[in-house]
Image (tube, helix red, strand yellow):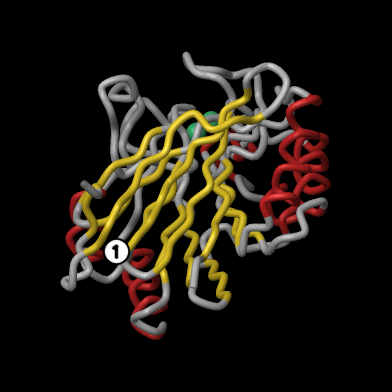
């Protein structure tokens, strides 16, 4: 049984390109994924009108969605809001508790979403994120309850894998400890934040990163999203990029897992 996930990220409503928003909405209905994983940064500055636009886009998706926040979904330099009520608009428009572990289940698939964005930290760069022990343990509890034949997916905003091109964008804090705990219990880690699409294996899991779906905050590559097709021990990550008039396939990477549930690139 093949399970298909569409991974979209860094929507950044407020900086969206309308033509691409429309094109992506019809792609998502045409490709008929079992799940659309939305990897954060739904808005540019967490403004009311940006959340309204994000909500309306999510409502237009027919497939089930699993949505996590990103650092841009916090009130930026509006310091009072950032400290006193950082997630007020998220709660109002997304209707979910930002730090509650979210799950989505469909035949052959179990996905967990955790919030890696933080309203402040003991460092000057508050765009950084982290995953804490509770979030890892709650994700593991969901995976352990699922069937071993289910594809197990963890959705975050901050990445578990960086490339040379994305090395200046921080990896999710405490990623090393999380990877050790998740090893052989999770199959796929989905993230965003870098606005770059790439994938690879880390900690024995497949890590897939998608670029900015339709915002003009480009970091050296076109807008894009990923389609992930998994069938038992095989998985393919297909990157779709905007070519100026439509989305087209720009890369395809195959992975396979062994009987210790360790994933690696297929030869
Ligand atoms: Fe972003
Ligand atoms: Fe981000």
Q: Label 1 neighbourhood size at 10 Å, few (<14), some (14-19), many (20+)?
A: few
Q: Residue at x 55, y 34 (%)?
A: 240
- Disc 1 under 8 Å from ligand 2? The reply is no
Q: Secondary structure at mark 1?
A: helix
Q: Residue 72: image x %, image y %? A: 58, 34
Query: Eyeballing the image, is 98 above or below 168?
Result: below
Q: Is residue 137 left or right of residue 7?
A: left
The residue most toward the front is: 267
Q: Residue 88: image x %, image y %? A: 69, 50
Residue under pointer 1: 133
Q: Residue at x 37, y 39 (%)?
A: 121
Q: Residue 173: image x %, image y %? A: 29, 44
Q: Is residue 34 left or right of residue 205?
A: right
Q: Residue 249: image x %, image y %? A: 54, 33
Q: Residue at x 31, y 66 (%)?
A: 233
Q: Is residue 45 left or right of residue 222?
A: right
Of residue 116 and residue 224, the one placed in the foreground of this image is: 224
Query: Eyeballing the image, is 32 above or below 242?
Result: below
Q: Residue at x 18, y 73 (%)?
A: 259
How many numbered discs sit on the rendered protein?
Answer: 1
Of residue 258 and residue 41, the one placed in the foreground of this image is: 258
Query: Eyeballing the image, is 165 above or below 141?
Result: above
The residue most toward the top is: 220
């Amino acid at each position: 049984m093949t399970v298909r996930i569409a991974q979209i990220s860094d929507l950044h409503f407020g900086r969206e390109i309308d033509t691409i928003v429309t094109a992506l909405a019809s792609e998502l209905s045409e490709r008929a994924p079992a799940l659309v994983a939305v990897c954060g940064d739904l808005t540019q500055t967490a403004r009311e009108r940006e959340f309204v636009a994000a909500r309306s886009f999510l409502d237009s998706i027919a497939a089930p969605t699993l949505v996590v926040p990103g650092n841009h979904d916090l009130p930026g330099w509006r310091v009072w809001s950032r400290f006193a009520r950082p997630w007020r608009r998220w709660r109002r428009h997304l209707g979910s508790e930002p730090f509650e572990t979210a799950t989505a289940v469909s035949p052959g698939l179990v996905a967990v979403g955790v919030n890696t964005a933080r309203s402040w930290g003991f460092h000057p760069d508050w765009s950084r994120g982290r995953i804490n022990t509770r979030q890892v343990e709650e994700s593991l509890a969901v995976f352990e309850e699922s069937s071993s034949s289910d594809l197990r997916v963890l959705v975050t905003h901050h990445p578990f894998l960086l490339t040379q091109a994305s090395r200046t964008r921080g990896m999710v804090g405490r990623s090393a400890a999380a990877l050790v705990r998740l090893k052989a219990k999770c199959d796929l880690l989905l993230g965003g934040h870098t606005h770059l699409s790439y994938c690879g294996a880390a900690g024995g899991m497949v890590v897939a990163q998608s670029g900015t779906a339709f915002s003009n905050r480009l970091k050296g590559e076109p807008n894009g999203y990923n389609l992930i097709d998994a069938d038992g021990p095989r998985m393919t990550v297909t990157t779709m990029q905007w070519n100026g008039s439509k989305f087209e396939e720009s890369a395809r990477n195959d992975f396979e897992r062994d009987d210790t549930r360790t994933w690696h690139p297929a030869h």
